[in-house]
Amino acid sequence: MAVASASAAGLAPALAGARAVPLFARRGPLQETGARRWRVRGPVPPPRKERRLPGAFFRIGPRPAHATIARMKRILIALLCGASAWAGATGTASSVRDREIATCLPGEAVTWGDGLDRPAPGHRVRLVYRHAGAPPWFDEALVLGALQRAASAWSACGIPAEAVREAAARTSGGDDPAAVTLVQWSEAATRGNFALANLGDHTLSLSAAMFRLLAERNPHHPASQTLQMAISHEMGHFFGLMAHSRRCVDAMSYYTNGRGETCSTRDGGSHRAVVEYRSELPTACDIARCRAVNGTKGR
């Protein structure tokens, strides 16, 4: 029985401890420093005269207004330069990531060697979605939309795919049960992962508990992004991709192999350069692997 999972560390760096808030969103010196007002009883004393110690590079006494303004300008310039550098680094990583998603260069479709790819059974993927047990903030249309986007993207490999509601599947009938994959919310079936594909039982299971944990630990993280990513990853196993990719950007990737090795990027940078490096939908290399194992040319 083939089982493949999308683990907490593997598919949600925001939950696993990665930075999920841009640096410039944190409180900076300008926000922490406010003007303080003092109420003085009686006559206001004259300002103290400035004294400078012999040979010293600092002054004792109140800082002149022009010096304070100049200091604030230097702080502001430093903050703006830091923000520009951070934005530049993020922009570079994003542009490299975009090219990796769109293209697959010779020799890039490399896996961790943790599985053996095999043709999709029946050369067709049909998913039936059961909404019972989903977190309340995921309505049926949202989850079904994520399934349909993933199915449409994967079908570029040349294997027909579709995702429908359970009610629609009941009324249509005529499907071979062995050719239908049930998408469900089940804690027992996910075994502590965000999602898990069980090819033997023909199930793709999602964990409401893990998405609740994500919402508690990082409420600002876009949970729908993690949902799409988990669905695309697990669906790839039903297209025959059993091994996990070593390219960080691939939907079928794992960031680490559990032995201290990390995934690769085209420019040699870190996948931590952006909050989530992995693509939400299959990449060019994911599709190339799918075509290779299924002997298809795609659409």
Image: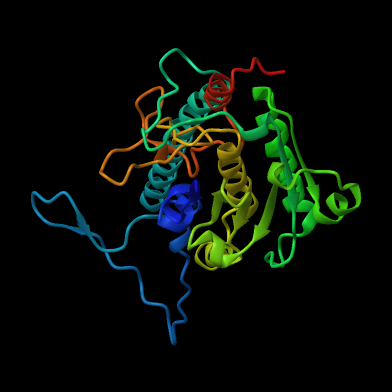
Judge by depth and name the residue closer to the eye, 119 or 133.
119
> Residue 7: x and y, percent?
46, 53
Residue positioned most to the left: 55
Residue lying at 54% horizontally and 18% vertically, measured from the top left: 103
Give 92 or 280, whichever is nearer the viewer: 280
Q: Is residue 13 above or below residue 103?
A: below
* 124 or 144: nearer the viewer: 124
The residue lying at 49 percent from left, 58 percent from top is 193
The reply to whether residue 100 is visible in this rendering is yes
Residue 138 image position (x, y, % from top left): 71, 60
- Locate the C terminus and report the quarter of the image it occupies: top right
Q: Is residue 256 left or right of residue 226?
A: left
Question: Which quadrant of the figure has residue 243?
Answer: top left
Looking at the image, residue 108 lies above or below residue 2: above
Residue 39 on image: x %, y %: 47, 81
Q: Residue 280's quadrant in the figure?
A: top right
